[in-house]
Image (cartoon, rainbow, N blue to C red):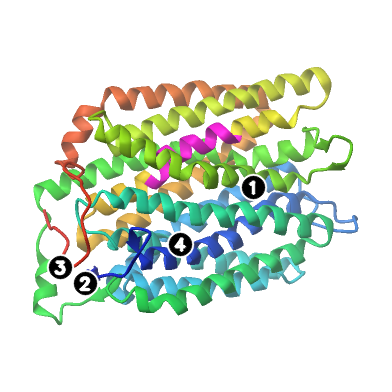
């Protein structure tokens, strides 16, 4: 069994299917809950057990190690989540299951005990695994093959992710750091309940997307039993190569929740003109703020760039994104040097680093999601999306290991090494672009505006 999208006429809003906005708000609240928890995770673990707002009293090294394992498992669980969608429930019902598990997980995390902390993390791992790969695949399923709106649709969807990501660290971070860690976790739980409510309400706009097909239907069985063509096999190869870039991207980018989060807390001068001290967790919102303000700008830029006939393949955008993100670590190198000289570093270094990280992310991440929905064979669509998120998880684990290495190597060396090595890798991908594009067999060629006014079965070639 697998998931199929039959596109009958879809009601549209602002030039996109209404279902996109249902998924937008569902993911916005899911990411509110996740990023609210993430903003507190390492800070809670290292908080002293004897303080008025007690944590576990762990060392930085121990906290970063658990952070790496946890964030890896959150995304690696997308592989079984994709399998469940393709083989048992379909994408739509698996997202519903994931939302329910997340509501439980974040609620349990709000309880004040060590046992409930780990139990809550387990439910969140399972919930994200069911929801994350399948809601992304459903976004792609709203558009027909060769519809140029697909990439822009993912940019809009990505804004939903980051509105949640922007609000969560500010609200959950303030409550968690200044009142109670577990009240902060509880606020994240409330966000997830909102997300689940939106998804349940919006089912009427998702009727033709993310449904399960089975071998009981002869027409559907032909889709499932047909062996992969040589073109489909080549497309899977280039997707797997792109996943290597994803691992590298997030291995660097996710220093935000670990090493850079602790750096903001322990080594950054957060005094705001003598008026108040900015909580360290608030800096987790800077990336999302830039995404909200820049997402449509970057998306529109690439659309105009492509219409001018210039190189705009997904692999090219990912490589450019990797380079821009890597250059952002140059500002963290400068922050490290300033700390060595003055005993603290200015906040603007963090802001500049997050600005470059955000532009790099906008070039790479929404595009890579769209790329999967263009190239993945129908019967493996959710599993391959699960592999993408698993690659993200491996990147998160690598981020934790890199953060831990800073204890021995030094933060300046880590930040500078990422800036140089990751930029070189991005340039190498650009040099290899032609053979990589050949493996895609024109999946991105001839994209144009396509209306959703008739039933369609996705292309099988």
Distance from Cα at disc 2 to Cα at disc 4:
21 Å
Q: Which residue is label 2 attached to?
A: 8
Q: Is any part of residue 418 visible from this angle?
A: no
For the point 64% across and 22% down, the residue is 333
| Mark 2 or 3, nearer chain start | 2
Part of the protein shown in magenta: 354-366
Label 4 crowd (10 A; few <14 / some 14-19 / many >=20): many
Image coordinates for residue 197, horizontal then vertical, percent:
52, 77
**How many tags in the picture?**
4
Distance from Cα at disc 2 to Cα at disc 1:
39 Å
Question: Who is closer to the viewer here, 186 or 387?
Answer: 186
Label 2 crowd (10 A; few <14 / some 14-19 / many >=20): some
Tell me the SS state at disc 2. loop
Q: Which residue is label 1 attached to?
A: 285
Q: Which residue is label 3 attached to?
A: 224
Tell me: 240 left or right of 411. left
Tell me the SS state at disc 3. helix
Q: Is residue 362 magenta?
A: yes
Secondary structure mainly formed by the magenta segment: helix
Quadrant in the rendering for residue 93: bottom left
Tell me: 313 left or right of 107. left
Label 3 crowd (10 A; few <14 / some 14-19 / many >=20): some
Distance from Cα at disc 3 to Cα at disc 1:
43 Å
| Mark 2 or 1, nearer chain start | 2
Q: Which residue is label 4 attached to?
A: 24
Q: Is any part of residue 316 visible from this angle?
A: yes
Image coordinates for residue 250, horizontal then vertical, percent:
49, 41
Q: Is residue 93 above or below residue 163?
A: below
> Foreground mark, 2 or 3?
2
């Amino acid at each position: 069994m697998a998931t199929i999208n039959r596109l009958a006429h879809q009601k549209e809003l602002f030039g996109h299917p209404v279902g996109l906005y249902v998924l937008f708000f569902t993911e916005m609240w899911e990411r509110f809950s996740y990023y609210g928890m993430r903003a507190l995770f390492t800070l809670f673990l290292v908080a002293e057990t004897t303080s008025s707002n007690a944590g576990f009293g762990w060392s930085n090294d121990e906290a970063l190690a658990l952070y790496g394992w946890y964030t890896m498992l959150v995304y690696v669980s997308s592989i079984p989540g994709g399998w469940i969608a393709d083989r048992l429930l379909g994408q739509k019902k698996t997202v519903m299951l994931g939302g329910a598990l997340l509501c439980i997980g974040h609620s349990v995390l709000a309880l004040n005990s060590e046992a409930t902390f780990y139990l809550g993390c387990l439910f969140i791992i399972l919930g994200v695994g069911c929801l994350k790969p399948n809601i992304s695949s459903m976004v792609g399923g709203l558009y027909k093959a060769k519809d140029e709106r697909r990439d822009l649709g993912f940019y809009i969807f990505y804004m939903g992710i980051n509105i949640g990501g922007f609000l969560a660290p500010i609200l959950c971070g303030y409550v968690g750091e200044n009142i109670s860690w577990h009240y902060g976790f509880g606020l994240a739980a409330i966000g997830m309940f909102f997300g689940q409510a939106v998804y349940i309400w919006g089912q009427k706009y998702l009727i033709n997307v993310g449904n399960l097909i089975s071998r009981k239907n002869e027409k559907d069985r032909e889709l499932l039993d047909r062996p992969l063509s040589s073109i489909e096999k080549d497309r899977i190869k280039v997707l797997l190569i792109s996943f290597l870039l994803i691992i590298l991207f997030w291995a660097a980018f996710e220093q935000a929740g670990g090493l850079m989060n602790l750096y903001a807390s322990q080594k950054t001068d957060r005094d705001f003109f003598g008026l108040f001290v900015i909580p360290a967790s608030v800096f987790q919102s800077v990336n999302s703020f830039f995404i909200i303000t820049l997402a449509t700008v970057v998306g529109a830029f690439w659309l105009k760039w492509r219409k001018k006939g210039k190189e705009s393949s997904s692999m090219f955008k990912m490589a450019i994104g990797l380079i821009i993100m890597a250059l952002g670590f140059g500002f963290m190198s400068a922050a490290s040097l300033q700390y060595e000289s003055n005993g603290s570093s200015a906040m603007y270094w963090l802001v500049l680093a997050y600005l470059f990280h955000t532009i790099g992310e906008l070039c790479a991440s929404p595009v890579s999601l769209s790329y999967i929905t263009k190239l993945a064979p129908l019967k493996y669509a959710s599993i391959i999306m699960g592999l993408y998120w698993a690659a993200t998880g491996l990147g998160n684990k690598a981020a934790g290991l890199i953060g831990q290495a800073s204890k021995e190597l030094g933060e300046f060396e880590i930040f500078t090494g990422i800036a140089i090595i990751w930029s070189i890798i991005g340039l190498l991908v650009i040099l290899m672009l032609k053979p990589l594009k050949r493996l895609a067999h024109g999946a991105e060629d001839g994209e144009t505006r396509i209306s959703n006014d008739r039933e369609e079965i996705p292309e099988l070639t």
